[in-house]
Amino acid sequence: MSRSLRNGLVLLAVIVVVTFCTIYFTVDLSTWRAFSYFSLQNIIAALAVLAIGMYFDGRRLQRLVAMNGYRVSMLGILQVIFGNYFLGLLTPGASGGAVAQVMILRSIGVPVAKSTMIVIIRTVFSILFLVFAIPIVFYFDNMDIPYIGHDSLFYIATVFVLCCVIGFWLFTGVWGKTIAYRLLLMLHVKPRRIRKTIRFLSDLNDTLRILARHPRDTLLVFVESGISLCMIYSILPALLWNAEQSGPYGILLGRMIVLNFMLYFAPTPGGTGVAEGFFILLFKNYVPSGSVGILAVMWRALAEYLPFFIGMYFVLTLFGKKYLLHSDAEHERSGC
């Protein structure tokens, strides 16, 4: 059995176990009554907001590619987006998603160096939107997370925003390369790694200069990032459409922003287990009684598992057995 197939089966088993536990420990006698509002319209609404989110995600990526001098069809863009979901779900912190994006962009004519920078900027814009949104969420939502007070959350989020802004300013200019070079020398990093780091910062500076030359398109990329994320995070409100005991849309959307930001740091592949646990913690008082576990599973199925299988189809269609064999060969060479 190949390593890729084995990993896929292990992930499937984990998902099944997590799904079973999530439902088993949250279902009670009120569950059936809580879902009396639910109909096919809820699923259609959830799929509609997901499709809108994916469209704007594709538009911003297509715009970034065009700003760097390349043209990619919307089909190619969708392959990149869904490929990101495929490998992202298989790796902790969705780290494999970036590899998938670069790999697919390279296959459709964008050089590796440019693909890498485009993927990084795309990810940075997503994280920046979340970083700027989180202090607003904490300001209006008296969120209760164990061992962390509400005021502490707000101040932590604000400091995080400032750190991102300062770090972005420091490490994207000449000063950034100088600081990085001296820091790496102090840490006795090998010269080869120092050269790679300085080259990476140079490529990043080139990409940022391109963004600076297109301020209107750069602003549109940020706006499209926000629209895309808000639409994808609106899956839960769509599933709760017509429910009597659900929280306001603003509260639900804000908590989804916090939840998805935390998943960037989840140690499990695709945040499996962590996502369901935090979902129950954040939404148990804002959804109909007895429905939080089932809603957690439905949210994951629509937001992650459905795009995962579409991405798997695209990746295997593009690369087929060559991708799987290459993956196994790399694993064997690493000695793992």
Image (tube, rainbow, N blue to C red):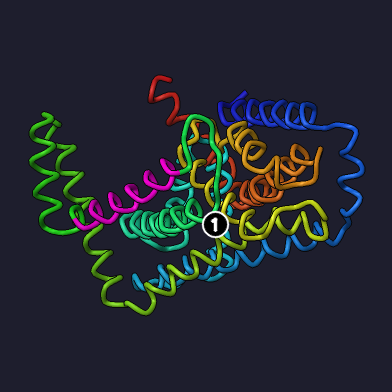
Give the class, few, some or many, for how many residues have Cα within 10 Å of label 1's Cα (few <14, many ≥20): many
Specify whether residue 265 is painted magenta: no
Residue visible at 59% across and 28% down?
7
Q: Quadrant of the C terminus?
A: top left
Q: Residue furthest top?
A: 335
Range covered by the magenta-colored residues: 151-169
Q: Is residue 279 left or right of residue 112?
A: right
The residue type indicated by label 1 comes to Ile
Vertical order, 267 against 297 (above or below): above
Residue visible at 10% across and 43% down?
181
Specify whether residue 168 is painted magenta: yes
From the top left corner, tell me how far across and down residue 200 is, in percent: 23, 50
From the top left corner, tell me how far across and down residue 29 is, in percent: 90, 33
From the top left corner, tell me how far across and down residue 104 is, in percent: 48, 54
Residue visible at 15% across and 59% down?
173
Tag count in the figure? 1
Residue visible at 39% across and 71% down?
70
Tell me the element at label 1: helix
Vertical order, 254 against 228 (above or below): above
Vertical order, 68 against 6 (above or below): below
Q: Is residue 272 left or right of residue 291?
A: left
Q: Quadrant of residue 12?
A: top right
Q: Is residue 283 left or right of residue 198?
A: right
| Residue hosting label 1 | 81
- Secondary structure of the magenta portion, mostly? helix
Q: Residue furthest bottom?
A: 216
The residue nearer to you, when weighing 234 against 66, is 234
The residue nearer to you, when weighing 172 against 65, is 172
Q: Quadrant of the N terminus?
A: top right
From the top left corner, tell me how far across and down residue 283 is, in percent: 67, 43
